[in-house]
């Protein structure tokens, strides 16, 4: 393998172990075992486990962000884009949500992971703010602080996602999706049902 290919294989192995064991439960030895190699090789290609975990997490999280951006293709109006944002966010994928929860949990102890999770969280908020800003500009949405409203909506989405993953027998994905859409409608002065499902599941 070339150095780049070897590095990519190590990150892929790290992602696989993270999916099984969680971020906190991932070790260099686990990653080496996943690849069928030695811990020394992992250390040769990565400055630290923290940096490796941050890189693997960034790949997972950025794939989610790009999935939303791709889903905007052909949707030009702000309300349509916001519907799509909710549609893609509410997909039935506990693993993606679990990875984010793991990252937030570990961020206080892992500076590299904290930097990456914060930057990506800010990118999610900026994407949502751009949609809401478009809606305010064209008169389809009403709010007096686009950034604050974007953070509140994102926090509602994330908080309900946590409840679904941790307590799925109490709050279902469907309920969390409906409540988050209704909350956004209230925040943005939209009529009830304005953000109903836009994409076929």
Image (cartoon, helix red, strand yellow):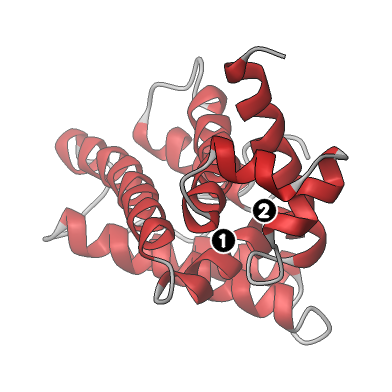
The numbered dot on residue 100 is 1
Quadrant containing the N terminus in the rendered view = top right
Residue at position x 56%, y 53% in the image: 53
Q: Position of residue 98 (x, y in %)?
A: 67, 64
The numbered dot on residue 96 is 2
**Residue sitting nearer the eye, 188 or 148:** 148
**Left or right: 44 with respect to 15?**
left
Q: CA distance from mark 2 to mark 1?
A: 7 Å
**Residue sitting nearer the eye, 43 or 160:** 43
Residues at badges 2 and 1 in contact (C-beta under 8 Å)?
yes
Say which element carries label 2. helix
Residue at position x 38%, y 56% in the image: 112
Going by the picture, which residue comes out furthest to the front?
40
Q: Position of residue 135 (x, y in %)?
A: 26, 40
Q: Residues within 10 Å of mark 1 (few under 14, many from 20)?
A: many
Q: How many marks?
A: 2
Give above or below for 158 relative to 84: below
The numbered dot on residue 110 is none
Q: Position of residue 181 (x, y in %)?
A: 52, 60
Going by the picture, which residue comes out furthest to the left?
144
| Residue 92 can be seen in this image | no
Give above or below for 151 relative to 74: below
């Amino acid at each position: 393998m070339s150095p780049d290919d070897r590095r990519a294989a190590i990150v892929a192995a790290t992602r696989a172990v993270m999916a099984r064991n969680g971020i906190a439960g991932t070790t260099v030895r686990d990653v080496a075992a996943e690849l069928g190699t030695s811990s020394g090789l992992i250390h040769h290609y990565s400055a630290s486990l923290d940096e490796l975990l941050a890189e693997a997490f960034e790949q997972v999280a950025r794939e989610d962000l790009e999935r939303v951006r791709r889903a905007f293709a052909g949707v030009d109006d702000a309300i349509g884009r916001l519907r799509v944002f909710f549609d893609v966010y509410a997909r039935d994928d506990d693993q993606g949500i679990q990875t984010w929860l793991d990252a937030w949990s570990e961020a206080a102890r892992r500076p590299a992971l904290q930097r990456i999770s914060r930057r990506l969280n800010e990118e999610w908020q900026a994407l949502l703010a751009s949609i809401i800003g478009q809606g305010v500009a064209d008169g389809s949405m009403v709010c007096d602080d686009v950034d604050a409203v974007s953070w509140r909506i994102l926090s509602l989405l994330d908080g309900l996602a946590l409840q679904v993953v941790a307590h799925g027998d109490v709050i279902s994905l469907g309920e969390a999706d409906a409540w988050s859409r209704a909350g956004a409608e209230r925040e943005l002065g939209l009529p009830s049902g304005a953000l109903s499902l836009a994409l076929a599941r």
